[in-house]
Image (cartoon, grey):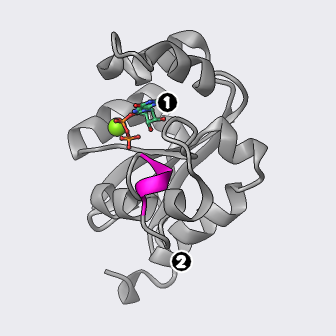
């Protein structure tokens, strides 16, 4: 079973899209293993986006991620990393297909509502950055035998 880190970025919270986005993850069959609201510090944002340090949009991206509360979640299930990326759509909302979160709710490249880890290795590192082990819960969903 794979885990992935999902962030509903400050624009998702400000635009009241949190429930709509979480609904899509539940509907797909992924299992929620952790959830909290975080006002990201500059330090946390820098660590999270370390791979983008030096890019032209880096400073603006940090300002965005620290501009208001973020919903941090861990979702678990079969192929959770790639399933989440498919639910999200492409980075640029304008290029994302309808039916995806970014395709349905945005036009922006930066303010694109959601982050999802891009590999199982990134997921492990990002989950450890945003959550303590005791903030993640192991349990079985009642319909587990019916969902892959
Ligand atoms: P991803 O979130 O689809 O994995 P990344 O390339 O990892 O996209 O970029 C991280 C985040 O940085 C994006 O989600 C978006 O918020 C922002 N970003 C990426 N490319 C640009 C850009 O060209 N201009 C402004 N912001 C960008
Ligand atoms: Mg990325």
Tell me if residue 131 is in the magenta stretch: no
**Are there few (<14), some (14-19), or many (20+) residues within 10 Å of tag 1?**
some
On the picture, is 52 further left or further right than 19? left
Q: Which of these two is toward me, 47 or 100?
A: 100
Task: Report the magenta stretch's main SS.
Answer: helix
x%, y% of residue 60? 54, 18
Taking 91 as reference, is 68 above or below it? above
In the rendered image of this protein, does residue 147 appear above or below residue 91? Answer: below
Residue ID at (57%, 65%) = 104
- Hey, which quadrant is residue 77 in on the image? bottom left
Query: In what element is the residue under mark 2?
Result: helix
Sequence-first disc among 1 and 2: 2
In this picture, which residue range is highlighted in magenta? 92-96
- Residue closest to the eye, 96 or 26: 96
Say the numbered circle drawn on residue 106: none
**Residue on which disc 1 sits:** 130
What x and y, as percent, mark residue 66? 64, 21
Up-down relation of residue 111 to residue 32 (above or below): above
Q: Is residue 16 visible?
A: yes
Q: Quadrant of the C terminus?
A: bottom left
Q: Is residue 24 left or right of residue 68?
A: left
Q: Is mark 2 within 8 Å of ligand 1?
A: no
Viewer-side residue, 21 vs 135: 21
Q: Secondary structure at mark 1?
A: helix
- Residue reaching furthest bottom? 146
Give the labeled residue for mark 2: 27
Q: Quadrant of the N terminus?
A: bottom left
Q: Residue 121: image x %, image y %?
A: 22, 38
Q: Residue at x 50, y 33 (%)?
A: 131
């Amino acid at each position: 079973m794979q885990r992935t880190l999902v962030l509903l970025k400050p624009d998702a919270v400000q635009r009241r899209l949190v429930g709509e986005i979480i609904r899509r993850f539940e509907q797909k069959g992924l299992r929620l293993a952790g959830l909290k609201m975080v006002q990201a510090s500059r330090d946390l944002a820098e660590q999270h986006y370390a791979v983008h340090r030096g890019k032209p949009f880096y400073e603006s991206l940090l300002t965005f991620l620290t501009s208001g509360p973020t919903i941090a979640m861990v979702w678990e299930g079969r192929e959770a990393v790639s399933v989440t990326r498919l639910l999200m759509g492409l980075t640029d909302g304008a290029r994302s297909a309808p039916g995806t979160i970014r395709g349905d709710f945005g036009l922006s490249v930066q303010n694109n509502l959601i982050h999802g880890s891009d590999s199982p290795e990134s997921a492990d590192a990002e989950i450890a950055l945003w959550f303590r082990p005791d903030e993640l819960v192991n349990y079985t969903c009642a319909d587990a035998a019916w969902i892959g």
